[in-house]
Amino acid sequence: MLTRMAYLHAVGLALLALGGWLSLCAADVGDFAPCLNFFYRSWPPKGLSGTPICQRYGNQYHFASLYSRPRRSPRFSAYMFSPPEGKRPPANWMFEPQLANTTADGNMTPFPLGELDPNVVNSQAVQLDYTNSSYTRGHLNPSLHHRTQEDRLSTFTLTNVVPQKFGSNNGPWETLENQVNHTLGSYCLGVAYVVTGVIPYLDNKHWIKGHRVAVPEYMWSAYCCPKYNKSLLNKVNLSKVFPTYAAIGRNDPNSTEEIVPIDKSSHKWFWGYDVRRMPLDTLEMYLKERFGTVISVFYEQCSGVK
Ligand SMILES: *[C@@H]1O[C@H](CO)[C@@H](O)[C@H](O)[C@H]1NC(C)=O
Ligand SMILES: *[C@@H]1O[C@H](CO)[C@@H](O)[C@H](O)[C@H]1NC(C)=O
Ligand SMILES: *[C@@H]1O[C@H](CO)[C@@H](O)[C@H](O)[C@H]1NC(C)=O
Ligand SMILES: *[C@@H]1O[C@H](CO)[C@@H](O)[C@H](O)[C@H]1NC(C)=O
Ligand SMILES: *[C@@H]1O[C@H](CO)[C@@H](O)[C@H](O)[C@H]1NC(C)=O
Ligand SMILES: *[C@@H]1O[C@H](CO)[C@@H](O)[C@H](O)[C@H]1NC(C)=O
């Protein structure tokens, strides 16, 4: 009896130890497996390559990003929308220690006041890259689209940020984020999955700080809300915005107008930073054109579950 109990005890301890070891080893960088819940039907967008990051803050996952190491910026961030409450938190910018060192802490970490580990500087964008760059830090996953303070604070990591012109970030792109907030907050009844990403320049010649961080030519965004208030279909024309909706925004007034035309009557601050709303399949057509491969943002274009 005693030996049997001792045996069970030992097995229990071993399982506990194994559990602890597994949770320590669940990598935040390199695999979306621990954070598939941020994607509609656990299905990350197909067709884009990069380094998956499960964005962990305060020991919890808050969203997911696909990171491009050569560009030192994300290709997209994926998150679940929740209606915001209260004010935008003060920015306390963070980095991803595991991009520099796979055995480092998986939580995003505030930039230290003093000197940064050169491995961190090599592996990702840092605060200095944006200083005097003429670009703002543009969130892909915006703080505005989250209810909890932790979700909001977790968006302030440079692995969720791309160089975005002020005229876009504080103009038409911000208007889009507000509009999506209102549409989803008012009519989406279940979970809304959002993916926001970038379209690189064709010539690959736009960088900040020499050749450190790549500037995107356009930003794009799409959401999938499979469960929405259909009783409003007659009152408000929602057929175009549910279950999916997408947009592409300019980040350069010099870009041609084939993808997004310029509204010539815009205020001079925002001139050339227009956002064009479009159906999901139109966005995917432009992504295919630019990346030269089929890009699917949502599983079965968000129509998989009824
Ligand atoms: C990586 O992180 C581990 C744990 O913090 C540390 O012991 C090791 O020295 C680091 N390696 C490098 C190359 O910085
Ligand atoms: C940014 O520009 C200002 C004004 O030209 C200059 O004083 C400052 O040293 C620059 N900072 C960096 C980090 O380049
Ligand atoms: C977001 O939408 C909610 C309504 O769902 C609204 O109360 C709130 O003011 C909006 N926030 C912003 C910043 O537009
Ligand atoms: C849908 O919208 C109608 C009209 O505003 C409202 O009466 C109803 O409660 C809403 N349904 C749900 C499930 O929120
Ligand atoms: C709503 O949009 C659909 C699709 O574009 C269009 O056919 C329909 O006429 C619109 N309905 C209203 C009431 O505007
Ligand atoms: C647009 O082109 C002008 C003239 O070539 C150049 O000075 C400016 O820096 C360009 N703007 C951007 C955002 O690249």
Image (cartoon, rainbow, N blue to C red):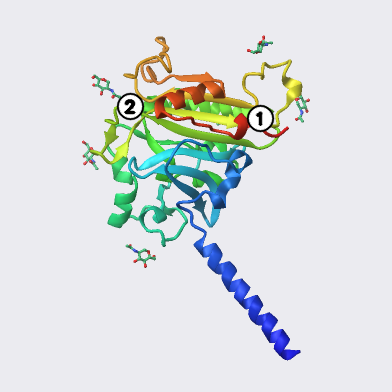
Determine the secondary structure under disc 1: loop
Q: Nearer the viewer, residue 106 or 266?
A: 106
Q: Nearer the viewer, residue 251 or 86?
A: 251
Determine the secondary structure under disc 2: loop
Contact flag, marks 2 and 1 (Cβ < 8 Å): no
> Position of 7 compared to 181: left or right?
right
User: Quarter-wise, where is residue 217 in the image?
Assistant: top left
217 vs 233: above or below: below
> Position of 232 compared to 86: left or right?
right
> Position of 106 compared to 130: left or right?
right
Pointer 1 residue Cβ closer than 8 Å to ligand 5: no
Q: Which mark is residue 303?
A: 1
In percent of width and height, residue 286 lies at 46, 23
Give the residue displayed 56% in from the left and 49% down from the top: 35
Mark 1 burial class by Cα count in 10 Å: few <14, some 14-19, many 20+: few
Residue at the far top in the pictured view: 265
Mark 2, residue position: 202
In percent of width and height, residue 165 lies at 36, 28
Q: Which amino acid is tagged 2?
A: Leu
222 vs 43: above or below: above
The span from disc 2 to disc 1 (Cα, nearest Å) is 32 Å
Residue at the far front in the pictured view: 293
> Position of 133 compared to 242: left or right?
left
185 vs 20: above or below: above
In percent of width and height, residue 148 lies at 59, 45
Q: Which amino acid is tagged 1?
A: Ser
